[in-house]
Image (cartoon, rainbow, N blue to C red):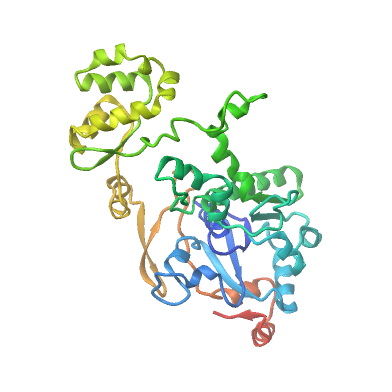
Amino acid sequence: MSGPLEGVRIIDLTAVLMGPFATQILGDYGAEVIKVEPPAGDTSRWLVPVKNQGLAAPFLHVNRNKRGMVLDLKNPAGLEALFRLVRTADVLIYNVRPQAMARLGLTWEALSAVNPMLIYVGVFGYGQDGPYGAKPAYDDLIQGALAIPSMVATVGDGVPRYVPVAMIDRTVGISAVAAVSAALYRREKSGVGQAIDVPMFETMVPFALGEHMAGQTYEPPTGPPGYARMLSRSRAPFATQDGYVCALIYNDKHWRSFFRFLGREEDFDRDPRLASIGARTKHTNELYGMVAELMRTRTTEEWLNFFTEADIPSMRLNSLDTLMDDPHLSAIGYFETHEHPTEGPIKQMRPAGVWSESPLSIRRLAPRLGEHTAEVLREIGYSEAEITAMAEAGATLLG
């Protein structure tokens, strides 16, 4: 059995994280992904830690299930090879600014002229119909534009900070996967391709404002933006006698069970702040602060056992180290060890989810720079002499 996108050929012109994460997922789904890099390679190849130059650990985690080839798209022979490759492709995805694609002559108009069924997907910073259209963008910059560091400052020590995960890149990458999948379905119905823009900023605005638009939802506004529960400084893992617990005491049943466990059920009935979810939201800071004090009275294990019995959502707080040893992940075999041709045994995070008819799989590990150049060029009709001439002219690199 093969993945749901078996038979789909994707040309991957992306680099670093957002685009490669998207194309890796598409590869996990069974698509044939051909990663096209410049002679210098994807810059993420040269990050750290690294065992062998050109295959840094971050690169290994977003470039599996791909073949890799090198084409210098500023060289006419390299550009011609890409056009020949496009004729065989279903999807082309890029994550540079559209202006850079235009300078190379790789616009939707140019590529659809040679392959009208092509799905042409750009993943970049901002929508092209606004004043930010030509601006460069990275995860940190989009976090800033979305007010995320400002919200972190509100709930923390007043200093704006970025969230320490590449949440924008990965979330927008997943949105690109959804766009490609939907466009492939649309093409099956219509028989024609299309160009799709997936802008980071606009894609992520609902993540910032979905709850926090609050009173600004209405015309005229009924209050300021900001959702009180999420902006509470007390909304944090609760300290116990010997560690931390993440818990969400949310509905009426949860709150009554919590007070019953403490032998204080009458307090729940008497306190008007606890009377409804609306009342509790208005008094989030006070109530979370009260819970924080109560949580210090017992051990982590005691609380986790109680929360499980009471069906109150809870989780032990992991560190990066303990996450790697999480018992659930261990039980499902989430971290798979694969033998890389040059790196030896490496851990891979398996594709998430279970498919009954078309399971996802790890079929290839991240390629060396130019590893499959000659192989792909042969497939699109190049002779050995032509491949050698391209390499000698600097239009490609043979891995």
Q: Quadrant of the rendered structure where residue 84 is?
A: bottom right
The quarter of the rendered structure image containing the C terminus is bottom right
Q: Position of residue 126 (x, y in %)?
A: 67, 51
Q: How many marks?
A: 0
Q: Residue at x 76, y 58 (%)?
A: 108
Does residue 338 sit above or below 129 in this rendering?
below
Left or right? Give the position of 102 relative to 281.
Answer: right
Q: Position of residue 236 (x, y in %)?
A: 35, 38
| Residue 369 seen in the figure | yes
Does residue 384 sit above or below 175 in this rendering?
below
Q: Residue at x 60, y 62 (%)?
A: 14
Single out the residue that lies furthest toward the front. 158
Q: Position of residue 61 (x, y in %)?
A: 45, 61
Q: Quadrant of the rendered structure where residue 121 is?
A: bottom right
| In-front residue for pair 87/63 | 63
Q: Residue at x 70, y 63 (%)?
A: 88
| Residue 87 seen in the figure | no
Q: Position of residue 25 (x, y in %)?
A: 52, 53
Left or right? Give the position of 202 relative to 332.
Answer: right
Does residue 80 sit above or below 24 in this rendering?
below
| In-front residue for pair 237/115 | 237
Does residue 47 sit above or below 395 in this rendering?
above
Left or right? Give the position of 165 relative to 119.
Answer: left
| In-front residue for pair 112/313 | 313
Left or right? Give the position of 147 relative to 61.
Answer: right
